[in-house]
Image: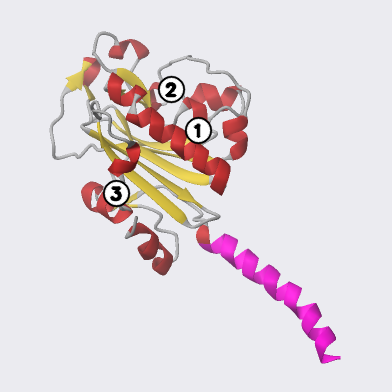
Amino acid sequence: MLKTKTLLIRPFIVALIILNFITFVQPSSAKPLSSDPNFCDYSLEYTYYSLCYSVQHRQALWAEHELTVDQIKGRQNRTNDFKADFQIKDPVSPSDFKGSGYDRGHLVPAADMKLNSKSMSDTFFMTNMTPQNSSFNSGVWNALEGHIRSEVLKLGPATVITAPVLLTTDSYDKIRSGVSVPEEYYKIAFFHDSEIIKAYLIPNRSSNGKKYSEFRITVDELEELTGLDFFSELPDDLENLLESSL
């Protein structure tokens, strides 16, 4: 009789363990936190991603989205419908990049948003654009974006944070209408199911043949550089473990 009870209880215990694991590793919010309550001039929520916009730099300070297999394997073609976002006062226009020598670089990649026409078109708001060196954009950065998609296909969904390094105390070169030109960009991908975090910090210039893997960095190092707190809603022990190692 005892054996029968044990067999009946075990599936229930296993189910609880699985449920707790899922809750444990997935933060309810992946938005980076700042000690400055005025860090984001605009906190914008699109259907499939969110971002923190800076009036000073006239671009996003970070963008966050959930990347899934369905989004990667979607059949939506690239729309290329660059457009100003009138949620922003005095928004940047697509023509502001003309003649600047820089690409209109996506923070949330268009290729990450192939689910439908809405997901794709929303990536072409100028709030999602940043001035990127052409060799960087089409080279090491493009390769990194492709790598993250490949990892999602193998490891499962990921929370992805992408951002320029723009500090309020530093001055930067500007393009037309005052858009700051970042010197570096970072990308963090947290793969929920496998409890893996990958973070990269790459200069906004030609990488001279270097691979994205050569730019790995810990999340702790990024937090020290940016002053932001990433994945703060994870349990402290897990957050400390993941963010301190490669």
Residue pointed to by mark 2: 125
Number of residues whose C-alpha sits closer than 10 Å to that of mark 3, classed few (under 14), some (14–19) or many (20 or more) = many
Answer with mark 1 or mark 3, whichever residue precedes in sequence.
Answer: 1
148 vs 180, left or right, is right
Residue pointed to by mark 1: 46
Q: Give the residue at x 64% y 64%.
A: 19
| Amino acid type, mark 1 | Tyr
75 shown above or below 164: above
Q: Measure the C-alpha gap from mark 2 to mark 3.
A: 29 Å
| Amino acid type, mark 3 | Ile
Can you give x and y, in whole percent of width and height, for residue 80 in the image?
Answer: 48, 14
Judged from the image, the secondary structure of the residue bearing numbered disc 3 is loop
1 vs 3, front mark: 3
Residue 166 in sight in this render: yes
Region of the chain picked out in magenta, as a range: 1-24
Judged from the image, the secondary structure of the residue bearing numbered disc 1 is loop
Residue pointed to by mark 3: 217
Q: Total marks drawn?
A: 3
User: Is residue 143 shown in magenta?
Assistant: no
Number of residues whose C-alpha sits closer than 10 Å to that of mark 2, classed few (under 14), some (14–19) or many (20 or more) = some
Residue 91 in sight in this render: no
Q: Are marks 2 and 3 in contact (CB under 8 Å)?
A: no
Q: Measure the C-alpha gap from mark 1 to mark 3.
A: 29 Å
Can you give x and y, in whole percent of width and height, for residue 176 in the image?
Answer: 23, 14
Q: Give the residue at x 40% y 18%.
A: 84
Can you give x and y, in whole percent of width and height, for residue 235 in the image?
Answer: 44, 66
219 shown above or below 100: below
Number of residues whose C-alpha sits closer than 10 Å to that of mark 1, classed few (under 14), some (14–19) or many (20 or more) = few
Q: Are marks 2 and 1 in contact (CB under 8 Å)?
A: yes
Quarter holding the N terminus is bottom right
